[in-house]
Image (cartoon, helix red, strand yellow):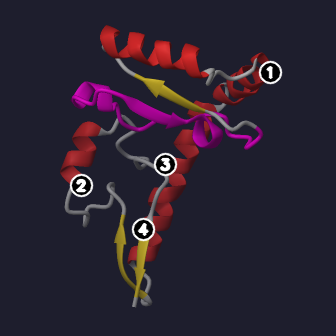
Amino acid sequence: INQKPLDFGADIVLHSVTKFLNGHTDVVMGALVCNDDQIAKRLQFYQNAIGGVPSPFDTWLALRGMRTLHVRICRANSNALKIATALEAHKNVERVSYPFLKSHRQYEVAKRQMTANKDSGGGAMVTVFLK
């Protein structure tokens, strides 16, 4: 969501529609995305042969969640940065791993690669190591 792996050389990107994209946890779905016609044709063959396609109602539910995706991602990014910053200063925390903390070893890489607002965090995942 906050990064574009295809722009950095990935062949296929797997998105969890169930979590971030849908946002309501009422759909179990994933999405494979690629920008290579040969890979896309191969994936389409498997999709047709195996039958791994969502129902029209499931796709409607996912679309419903996509309408609020931008707001949810911006809030999740902002909240994660605030939480990571606060935890980093907590006396019972050994360290915090979050790419938009200046203390993160790949902070500069995250700033260059991630598409989130550079002042509002990048991603919702925060790792905390307790003392």
Kindly identify the residue that appears in the image at 44 percent across and 83 percent down: 90
Q: Quadrant of residue 92?
A: bottom left
Q: Label 4 sits on what residue type? A: Thr
Q: 86 or 109: nearer the eye? A: 109
Dot 4 falls on a residue whose secondary structure is strand
Name the side, left or right, on which 72 lies relative to 97: right
Q: Which mark is residue 57?
A: 1
Ranked by sequence position, the earlier of labels 4 and 3 is: 3
| The magenta segment | 1-26
Q: Earlier in the sequence, mark 1 or mark 3?
A: 1
Is residue 84 inside the magenta stretch? no
In space, the residues marked 4 and 2 are separated at their CA atoms by 15 Å
Contact flag, marks 4 and 2 (Cβ < 8 Å)? no
User: What amino acid type should be assigned to the residue bearing mark 3?
Assistant: Asn
Tag of residue 107: 2
The numbered mark at residue 127 is 4
Residue 62, image x, y percentages: 69, 27
Residue 38 picture quarter: top left
**What label does residue 77 carry, if any?**
3
Tell which tag, 1 or 3, sits nearer the viewer.
1
* Residue depth check, mark 4 versus mark 2: number of the one nearer the observer: 4
